[in-house]
Amino acid sequence: MIKKHSNKAWVVAVDMGYGHERAAYALKDLAYGPILIANNYRGIPKSERQYWKTSRELYESVSRFKSVPVVGDLVFEIMDHFQQIEPFYPRRDLSSPSLQLKQSYDLIKKGLGKHLIELISRRPLPLIATFFQAAFMAEEMGYAGDIYCTICDADCSRTWAPLNPKQSQIKYFAPNGRVVERLKLYGVREENIYLTGFPLPKELVGGPKEPVLRHDLSSRIKNLDPKNIFRAKYSRALARRLGTHWYETNHKHPLTVTFTIGGAGAQRNLGIQIADSLSVKISQGKIRLNLIVGTHKETYHYYEQGIKDLKLTKYLGKYINIIHNATRHEYFTKFSQILHTTDILWTKPSEMSFYTGLGLPIIIAPPIGSQEQFNRLWLKTVAGGITQNDPRYTDEWLFDWVNSGGLARTAWNGFIEAPTHGAYRIESIITGKKIDLPQIPMIV
C-alpha cells in the first residue's frame, strides 16, 4: 500500500492547561487554517462546550487547591489516581483499558465530538491531535483521513492508547524512547509509533541545522559561565558543535531567569519568593527576572501588587517583567521571543521539560501530577534540569550554580541529549519530504 502524503493537516488541541496547545503551536506551519481547539471552536454545540468547561474548571481548581496544606494534597491525589502512570518495570502487558479510558469512549459513543469530526470530514486531511480524546473521536466516527496523536509528556498513562490498540489505526508521535516502549506495553502496534521528539517551536530552532538555537546557546553559555570554568574544560566540544567562531557571538542581555506559571495558575506564590530573594541583585542590575503569567489576568495583578510590596516597581520593564497576554496564541508567540534571551528556565516539569533540548537549563519546581513526576525523571536522566533549592535563598544558591559553570553544563547537556527537531520530523512524516536529521536514542 502506497502511503498518501499531504502538505497540510488538521491540527487539533484542547485548552486544558497549556501543554496540548503548546505542542500544536509548534506545528502551526502544518495546520490547514487555524489550529482547532476541540473544546472551544466556532460552532461547537452548547452541550459539548459546557462539558469541556466543567472538566477544565475542575482540573484547574484542584491543581490550584493542591497548595492548601494537607487537604489540598489529598484532594489532588484522588483526582490524579485516575490518570496514574504505572511503573514501567517489570515489562508486562498493560493493554487492559483503564476506567478513565472506558468513560472517554462512552462519551464518544453518546456523540461527544460528532460536530467537530463532521466539520473536518469535509476535507479529510491528516489529523494531528495533541489530546487523545480528539484522536479517539475521529477513529470511532470513521474519519477518512490518517489520524495521528502527539504525546506531550515523557511518559503516558493507559488513557492515551485506544480502547482496542491492536485494531486501531491511530498513529503516534512519541517525544522520547520511553513513550515508544510504553505504548507497546499498552498494545499499540510498533508500526503505528514514530519516535519524533516533542515539537519545539521552529522559530527557536531555525531549521535542521539549528542556526537560531546555536546562536542563542552561544550567548547563553557566556552568561552562564562568567568565570570561564565550563568553556575552558569543553572548548573543543563547543567549537565542534557550535562552530569554531561561536565565542564571537555577542550577548547584550543581563543574566536572565524566566519563571513560568502553568495553565492552571498553580505555584504563582513561588514567583514572588524568587523575586523577593533576588530583589537586591535585581536593583543592582545583576539579574533580570521574567514572570510569565500567560493569559491569567488575576495572576498578573497578583504579581503587580507583589512587586509593589517588594519596592521593585521602578525596575519593571528592565530588570523585572510580568508577561501577560490576552490570547493563548499571543502568549506562545511572545514566549518564544522571550526565550531567545533567557538563560535559565524555572518551571514545574510539565511539557516545558522538553525545552531543555533548546539548550535551556531548567530549574525544576515541584511536580503536579503523575505525568510531571515522570517528566522530572526524564529531565534528570538527560541531565538538563536540576531540582530547585529553597526559593527563599535563590540569591545564594543560584549564583553558586552560575559561578561554578554548573548551569552552563546543564544547558549543554540538554542541547546534546534531548530531542530538538520534533516539529521537523512530524512535518517530514506528514508531507513525505525527506529531512536529514540525527536519530534519537530509543530509550532515555
Image: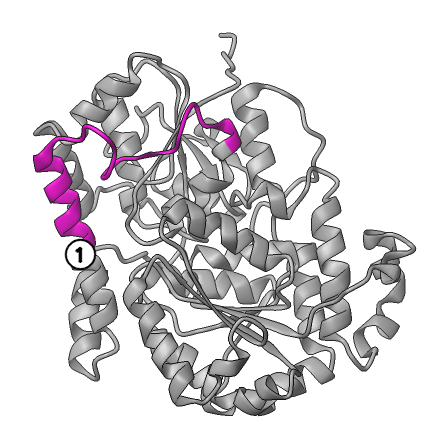
x, y percent for residue 376:
46, 65
Q: Which residue corresponds to mark 1?
A: 57
Q: Which residues are magenta?
A: 29-56
Give the residue at the far front of this rendering: 314
Q: What amino acid is found at the position of numbered circle 1 in the picture? A: Glu
Helix, strand or loop status at disc 1: helix
Is 246 displayed left or right of 181 in the figure?
right
- Tell me what residue is drawn at x 46 percent, y 49 percent: 332
From this view, report whether residue 370 is shown above or below residue 307: above
Is 110 displayed left or right of 215 in the figure?
left
x, y percent for residue 113:
19, 29
| Magenta stretch holds residue 189 | no
| Magenta stretch holds residue 44 | yes
x, y percent for residue 351:
44, 55
From this view, report whether residue 208 is shown above or below residue 342: above
Question: Does residue 81 appear anywhere in the picture?
Answer: no
